[in-house]
Image (cartoon, coloured by chain):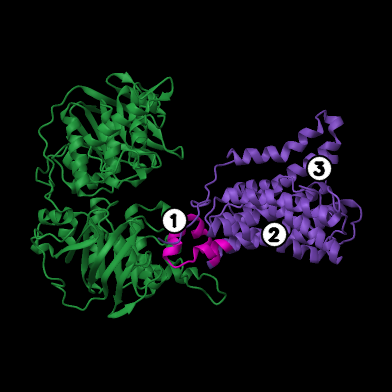
Amino acid sequence: MFSEVVTPELFASAVRLATPIALAAIGGAVCERSGVVNIAMEGLMLISAFAGVAAALLFGNAWIGVFVAVLASVLFSAIHAWASINLRADQVISGTAINILALGVTGFLMETIFGHPGTTDTVKTIKPLMDLPAGGGGVLGTIWQWVDVVFLSYTPLVYVGMFSAVFLTWAMYRTRWGLRLRALGEHPRAADTVGINVLRGRWVAVLISGFMAGLAGANLTLEQVGSFTENMTNGRGFIALAANIFGRWTPGGAYMASLLFGFADALQLKLQLFSDVIKIPPQFFLMLPYILTVIVLAGVVGRAVAPASVGKPYKEKG
Amino acid sequence: MSADPQAACELPPNVGQDRPPILELRNVSKRFPGVLANDDVSASVAPGEVLALLGENGAGKSTLMNVAYGLLSASAGEIVVDGNSVQIRAPRDAIRLGIGMVHQHFMLVEPLTVTENIVLGMEPTNSWGLIDRAVARKRVVEISAKYGLKVDPDSRVMDLSVGMQQRVEILKALYRDARILILDEPTAVLTPQEVHELFQIVRELVSQGLAVVIITHKLDEVMAFADRILVMRAGRVVGETTPEECSEQSLARMMVGRDVVLKIDKGPAKIGEVVLDVSDLVVLDDRKLPALKGVSFAVHGGEVLGIAGVSGNGQRELVEAITGLRRPSGGTVSLKGRDITHDDARRTIAAGVSHVPEDRHRRGLVLEFDLVENVALGDQRREPFSKHGILNRSALDTEARARIKDYDVRTPNEHVAASNLSGGNQQKLVLARELGRNPELLVASQPTRGLDVGAIEFVHRRIIAERDSGKAVLLVSMELEEVMSLSDRILVMYEGRVVAEFEGGQVTEEELGLFMTGGGRTPTEPSRASEEDTGA
């Protein structure tokens, strides 16, 4: 059974399933480092997933779908930024409001545009970036098959996720923007007293988070499923929040943590096929990623230190 | 309130200034809702001069300097730099004009390195627009060499001592080419050695042509290091003088507006039975590392035992372990022979321990609650305050009114939120609750932190009154002067251990400071070195 479960497809599926979580989690890391909690990622993903499908159907082009998905998510994240940065609203409340709004808006627009609830029409999904020929037989053929499937078989946004994890980690620790970003989340008043614009810095971070969550939603519908179903994100935005914490508020760490969640998800899908053999109900495996989330959020896996001022609205001066 | 004629050493303005001022504040007023924090204040400082801005908390010193630094905008008045009238809307304007400020609460990003903190906001960049770390580090090293401010540029700020962090703050200002340096209560958190070093640094800065403004309420420091003293009270300048022309006593009178007892009058201790017995106590800190590594001592009735030490050497954990807020992992704590090692706060209170916590906002009071509720905290289960879980409001009101009167808490009535009181009155409220319970042991941690002279006097008198009525007092304070003047015995804590014990009045500040920083003689031998009066 082992060889049937542990295949290159298992790992590839883990990466694919991890990607929407990772894209959102990377943005979440940027956002939280600036001092703003983005619990709205769930809703942002949902809105962009829907907007992407709707635009792709309307224009007949999946890439226009990706653009519209990101635009929608950035616009909604601006609501979060306005409420939590300018109005100094409680960031969790603001994020929750967006999550509920997203559920309502997508459900409503589904009926308005498609005339029925449930699931939208299907779009042609975006193809893998590379389409390489399968290897021959022998050991070399097997190695090639593993390399091809595990590393080279993905759609473009999967690679965007990997690239942004590396790029944003570098940017966070090696650029002026990154230094200032980290200062904002730790001690915004210190940043203010040396002339850094706290509100603008936080705005940028929230919008980046919106951008990344938009890519996450687009990946979900336009690269993976091909259609939108109500509440299809199904908690991935919250898992992304957990991945960001597990990854210690760094984009790279968030990506690695997302891979773990993706792997748990891939494993449960695979093991469902074998539930007769191993006598465990498939529903149990379904729980795996969520149980992992709870464990991570409960702080069992290493105690991470959050940015000191995360979640605290900043008031410029008296 | 008008300027008092009693300000004996008041002089005409600008005495002693031979150079034109670099920074002038002219007729500055700052109005907050309901308060006039600065009322037509004028002040100036010249290059090569140390100006002390002296006053009680709430006198408006920090407000004035925050106006100069652009953190607050003045309601009226003019700021003049180098003879030109300027607009300072934000700190970046102030920085551009060469004004630097070291805030009382440091504006440092703890997880970042010294260099990163110093260059933050003005990072040197290379041709790619990226931070040039080599250049940044080099500039930091250069500036620290130029002014004799030794600090490791690659350490993370969170790993530095408070004194070192303060140097980073000063370097931050110098990196921005500050010509005017404002230090807000710079010595509040320093050891005597660090204070000494700070003032050497200040001397160096001044000799290189900087103008330095020090905001403080400590009279001895003003006398020792200021070139010129501006005394503020209730938002106004009430006097200007120099150390040569006045005394601590006259300064205190100007500051408070009445005569103040600076020295604590206490009779000899009438030592009673052991009240608190701490034996081999081991306590872990929040990171699960040992903060107390086997501490033993006893406090007797009628005695004040003072604990001196640099913040973070286990004092907090000690206090929390005794008051039931933290569970010791080894050793015992007993009160009058009863083991209270594992008692929680509720049972510790019932056993007769009262606690004045170091942070009155977070632990001493519930700021949103009114005074009655704050007085009741901890006793809310007791009759007559409550019965069967239901509060008896009228009994509470009566008790609260009595204690507010007894402890001279200045408040419009007992139903305002504690957050509306001044710091001094808040602390009186904490004392009213904790001492009103008539405890066997008072654990007072930093009981006068951030209080002004008048309130300090009150708190000190109450602590001595407890001692004189035969109660045991454990006093933890970073203020050496306080520990030395109140304590009958002094323990010095360093890295989770008691490293020295002294009889009160038989040790100098310098000696204590040496032990506090891990130096000093072998800790077994009590000091006989000095009996001199250290109050002055």
Point out the frontmost of discs 3 and 2.
2
Q: Which residue was labeled with disc 2?
A: A73
**From this viewpoint, is residue B493 visible?**
yes
Mark 1 closeness class: few <14, some 14–19, many ≥20 residues within 10 Å:
some
Estimate the spatial distance between the alpha carbons at disc 1 and disc 2, rounded to whole Å: 37 Å
Specify whether residue A124 is painted magenta.
no
Above or below, A86 against A259 in this view is below
Colour of the chain lettered B: green
Amino acid type of the residue that numbered disc 3 sits on in the rendered structure: Val
Q: Which residue was labeled with disc 3?
A: A6
Name the quarter where the N terminus of chain A is drawn: top right
Above or below, B524 against B132 in this view is above
Residue A82 vs residue B19, the one in the foreground: A82
Name the quarter where the C terminus of chain A is drawn: bottom left
Chain seen in purple: A
Asked if badge 1 and badge 2 are on a common chain, one would say no
**Bounds of the magenta span?**
A177-203
Q: Tell me which residue sits at (73%, 55%) in the image.
A: A47
Q: Which residue was labeled with disc 1?
A: B156
